[in-house]
Image: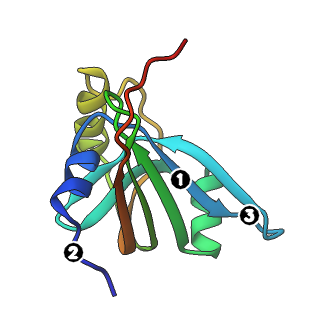
Amino acid sequence: MGIALSADVKALLDGPNLAHLATVLRDGSPHATPVWVGREGDRVLLGIGDDSLKGRSTRREPRVALSIVDVADPYRMAALRGRVVERRADPDFAVKDAMSVKYTGRPFPWRYPHGVILVIEVERARYQRIPLEHRPG
């Protein structure tokens, strides 16, 4: 059962912040990869190739984790755990294009036949803001 996301977590998901998706491989080892994210209410959306490693892994094991960090303030972050509850077709790339515009200012440049939207229901979410200033030396 999904939870209601806080305003802070929603703001991170709605901004142009890359997330890292962790899935479980067939041998039980973790696999993490950066992804674009969208949001539909309290659910997280990811546009992927269904035949990708992420697609295959989430079909077999729907439990996932996401970490997301504010691109402007990397000490503002969230860690989410949940499960893929739906694989939604996106034949006209409407959702993927909206994500691409959020991150790049343009529609997604490629079209591929096995694109799907993963719908993730969040079961746990932890938001954190550490009072540090990011000044790489």
| Mark 1, residue position | 21
Residue 136 visible to an observer of this rendering:
yes
The residue under label 3 is 25
Which amino acid type is marked by label 2? Ala
In the rendering, at what x and y percent does residue 4 appear?
A: 21, 75
Badge 3: residue crowd in 10 Å (few <14, some 14–19, many ≥20): some
Viewer-closest of 32 and 118: 32
Q: Secondary structure at mark 1?
A: strand
98 is higher (above) or lower (below) than 26: above
Nearer to us in this view, 17 or 106: 17
- The spot of residue 80 in percent (x, y) is 42, 64
Viewport quadrant of the N terminus: bottom left
Residue 33 in which image quadrant: top right
Q: Quadrant of the C terminus?
A: top right
Q: Residues within 10 Å of mark 1 (few under 14, many from 20)?
A: many
Amino acid tagged 1: Leu
Residue under label 2: 4
